[in-house]
């Protein structure tokens, strides 16, 4: 470890939040593996190393709770509280056979075919959201489009009644910061209080679904079976909250980050307006260019060499996804946005056994939103050239993005 360089940086500084990519380039140039200046964990900075780490069975995801043999675990949430109970069962924090079983059952009701079937409803939702925007001629992208679109889709997909959706969104907003590597006391307390309210709500909704079954995702999760195995009520309740969180957070950031990138490069926006068929490829390029998920972590199961550095069991390794997506060794001109770029395979949704279950839905929502924007809008212009970014290291997203629309 003594030979691993340390490149000091502050991921919550205004300069880094505004544009992390010059700093990430310094990390890549220093070494394929550097030591974090805060905590000493290893950070992988280049594409091939990150890709190998994500796919390696020698690593697991960190637990959503701290145990005696997991010193790099998260803050000590109340071990008897519902937040800990849910995090223990979130798909994100499962491992090995338990993860494989849970993922297989969830994917039975989250298939690509089921996602494709949502396209007409997503198109209608985007149209409904854009109608008042075009009438006003102004838009705050996050509040008016990037957040309500995926939040509404996941509510409808899960089967959450329309009257309850604002409450569910408020609970999710309070709990989302617990996905960051550092959680403040106030954030932890707010998240625990939110889950004390959300857990009984979800369980009451499941009881109602048992009495009056429907066709939503919660109904399918109650009914799904594989070789006699079923999801328990605890697993369904926990992963309903997880899917709600994951079902809108990444897409909100992808739409906001992606549109901001296009607005700063009018030539690329003009290409999409002239050739809307390129939007699907453009979404892949935007995922690469300004990833909504910047980092993810893994924990070694066994002693192993990573990029020439020895990693001991239970040690944490940070995969710098955004740095890998800009690696000069993988992409020509990586700091340029090119909606025609060929062979774009961003690592933004992870890889291997823990590849994001909602990736197809996020791509579909963003593709439909951007297609309608570029085909229906005569002009799209930034109001503020330097909008505010949310103070987050793992998840990159704008707090606000005001634009003019015609």
Image: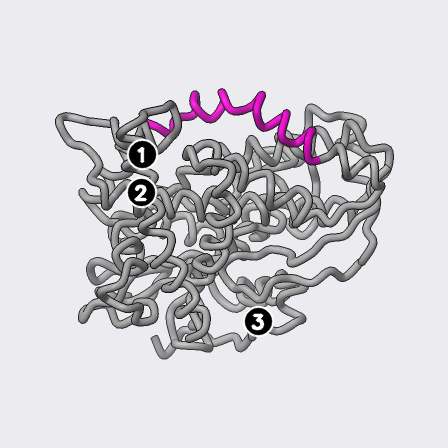
Q: CA distance from mark 2 to mark 1?
A: 6 Å
Give yes or no for contact between labels 2 and 1 (Cβ–Cβ under 8 Å).
Answer: yes
Which residue is outermost to the left?
A: 228
For the record, the magenta segment spans 106-129
N-term mark: 3 or 1: 3
Residue at the image point whose x is 41% and y is 73% from the top:
4
Q: How far across and down, in percent of the image, does residue 316 sit?
A: 32, 65
Q: Quadrant of residue 384?
A: bottom right
Residue at the image point whose x is 31% and y is 42% from the top:
204
Residue at the image point whose x is 44% and y is 50% from the top:
48
Q: CA distance from mark 2 to mark 3?
A: 39 Å
Please state, as top left, top right, bottom left or bottom right, where the C terminus lies in the image.
top right
Q: How far across and down, in percent of the image, does residue 16 sit?
A: 62, 68
Q: Secondary structure at mark 1?
A: helix
Query: 58 left or right of 47?
Result: left
Circle 2 residue: 204
Q: How far across and down, in percent of the image, does residue 169 sit?
A: 50, 49
> What predominant SS class does the magenta segment belong to?
helix
Residue at the image point whose x is 62% and y is 48% from the top:
289
Circle 3 residue: 12
Q: How far across and down, in percent of the image, does residue 290 sit?
A: 61, 51
Mark 1 neighbour density, 10 Å: few (under 14) some (14–19) many (20 or more): few
Circle 1 residue: 208
């Amino acid at each position: 470890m003594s030979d691993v360089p340390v490149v000091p940086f502050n991921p919550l500084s205004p300069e880094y939040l505004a544009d992390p990519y010059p700093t990430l380039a310094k990390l890549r140039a220093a070494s394929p593996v550097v030591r974090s200046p805060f905590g000493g964990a290893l950070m992988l900075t280049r594409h091939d190393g990150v890709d190998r780490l994500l796919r390696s069975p020698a690593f697991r995801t960190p637990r959503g709770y701290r145990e005696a043999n997991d010193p790099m675990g998260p803050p000590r949430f109340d071990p008897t509280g519902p937040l800990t109970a849910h995090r223990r069962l979130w798909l994100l924090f499962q491992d090995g056979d338990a993860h494989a079983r849970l993922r297989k059952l969830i994917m039975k009701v989250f298939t690509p075919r089921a996602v494709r079937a949502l396209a007409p409803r997503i198109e209608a939702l985007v149209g409904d959201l854009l109608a008042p925007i075009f009438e006003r001629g102004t838009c705050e992208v996050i509040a008016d489009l990037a957040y309500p679109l995926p939040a509404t889709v996941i509510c409808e997909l899960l089967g959450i009644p329309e009257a309850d959706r604002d409450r569910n969104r408020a609970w999710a907003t309070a709990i989302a910061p617990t996905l960051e590597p550092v959680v403040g006391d106030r954030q932890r307390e707010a998240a625990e209080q939110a889950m004390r309210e959300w857990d009984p709500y979800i369980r009451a909704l499941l009881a109602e679904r048992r009495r009056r079954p429907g066709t939503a995702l919660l109904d399918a999760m109650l009914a799904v079976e594989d070789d006699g195995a079923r999801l328990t009520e605890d697993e369904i309740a926990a992963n309903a909250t997880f899917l709600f969180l994951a079902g809108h957070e990444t897409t909100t950031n992808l739409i906001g980050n992606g549109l901001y990138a296009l607005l700063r490069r009018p030539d690329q926006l003009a290409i999409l307006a002239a050739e809307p068929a390129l939007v699907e490829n453009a979404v892949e390029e935007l995922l690469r260019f300004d990833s909504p998920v910047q980092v993810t972590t893994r924990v070694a199961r066994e002693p192993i060499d990573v990029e020439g550095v020895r990693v001991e069991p239970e040690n944490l390794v940070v995969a710098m996804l955004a740095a890998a997506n800009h690696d000069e060794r993988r992409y020509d001109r990586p700091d340029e946005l090119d909606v025609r770029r060929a062979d774009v395979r961003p690592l933004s949704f992870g890889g291997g056994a823990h590849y994001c279950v909602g990736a197809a839905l996020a791509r579909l929502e963003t593709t439909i939103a951007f297609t309608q924007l570029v085909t229906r809008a005569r002009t799209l212009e930034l109001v503020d050239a330097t909008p505010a970014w949310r103070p987050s290291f793992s998840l990159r997203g704008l707090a606000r993005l005001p634009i003019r629309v015609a």
